[in-house]
Amino acid sequence: MPDRLPPLTALRAFDAAARHMSFAKAADELHVTPAALSFQIKSLEDHLGAPLFRRLNRAVELTEAGKTLAVGTEPGFDTLRNAWRNVTRALESNTLTVTAGPAFTAKWLAPRLFHFAQAYPEIELRFAATFRILDFDRDDVDVAIRFGMGGRESAALFSKPIINDWVTPMMHPALAEQYSDLASLTRAPLLDQEDTRFLKPPLDWPAWFRAAGLDAAPEISASFNQADHAIDAAAAGGGVVLGRVSLTERDLMEGRLVMPFPLALTTEAHYRFVCPKGAETRPHVAAFLAWLEAEAQSLHAYREGRVFVPAADVAD
């Protein structure tokens, strides 16, 4: 049998029918009539010289030949779709799609968009604020910013640390007048954040209390599953948050939060810039990375006068 491939339209019809196991549903997907789809599959069977489907009363099922062909057609069309998506994305040279966590997007990226737009007016940024693990090809994402230990990225990905984070108690200035020393902090309304519970060693109130030499166990007033919600509550005077400097910089700068205690906990967890390997050299991706690194320099100002203790040193 010659190796000449059958028409792509016939293979596409077969792929859709094999996935749906229905000629009618496959026809709907491809926006053709069932008769037209049936004709394409019949022409494919004629080209092969063997049936690919058994036509039952109200259903179809794959023959052995059909099963063998289906193993290759589905990933083959996925590869074609991904290649097409990649080339069209590359041609959209003015658009850069970035995914980051909701808190980082709201508290760090969004307030800086004006700066980026001024520096790179030719680039349109699009954001997907989610913790979900995204597929760069399937989800049309160019860059991901993720928080964690890192080091587990696929060899197919480029990864670079951009922000090393640390935490310290933060509160509204009015609360700082009430809870001005360590002893009084044990009576303060403490706000908990669930977004860092995955870290080992933990970066939480018990760890900070141990580092500060406080014997009392911290009593949590309220817990939040999103860091930005806890920060907003603290900025409104609702309690004391163990704030990450990366997410609280704007509130600190504008006076909604203060850091009355010099002790801070550090962690090996960090924000990292991730993209498909090779994409980091694309002009817009490289520009975005350079801009992120430059913006992150502003966080160094908040280190002055602080005493840093690694969370690992006070782990249980």
Image (spheres, grey):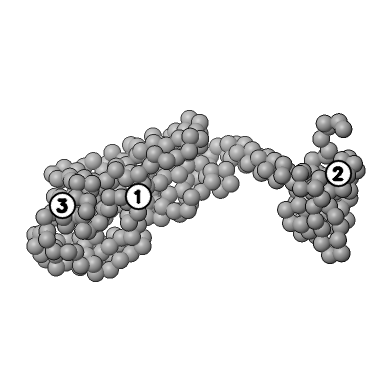
Does 215 sit left or right of 93 as displayed? Answer: left
Element type at mark 2: helix
Which numbered disc, 2 or 1, marks the residue that appears first in the sequence?
2
Residue 65 seen from this side: yes
Which class describes the residues within 10 Å of circle 2: few (<14), some (14-19), or many (20+)?
many
Query: Residue visible at 11% across and 61% down?
Result: 215
Query: Residue visible at 42% across and 37% down?
Result: 159
Does 181 sit left or right of 283 as displayed? Answer: left
Q: Which residue is mark 3?
A: 211
Front-most of residues 237 and 186? 186
Rendering coords of residue 157 (x, y %): 48, 36
Which amino acid type is marked by label 2? Leu
Residue 250 seen from this side: no
Which numbered disc, 1 or 3, marks the residue that appears first in the sequence?
1
For residue 44, the mark is: 2
For residue 108, the mark is: 1
Rendering coords of residue 266 (x, y %): 23, 46
Q: Mark 1 or mark 3: which is in front?
A: 3
Q: CA distance from mark 1 to mark 3?
A: 28 Å
Q: Quadrant of residue 116?
A: top left
Q: CA distance from mark 3 to mark 2?
A: 71 Å
Asked if the residues shown at circle 2 and circle 1 are in contact, with their CB atoms under 8 angstroms apart, the answer is no
Which amino acid type is marked by label 3? Ala
Which amino acid type is marked by label 1? Trp
Q: Mark 2 or mark 1: which is in front?
A: 2
Front-most of residues 217 and 271? 217
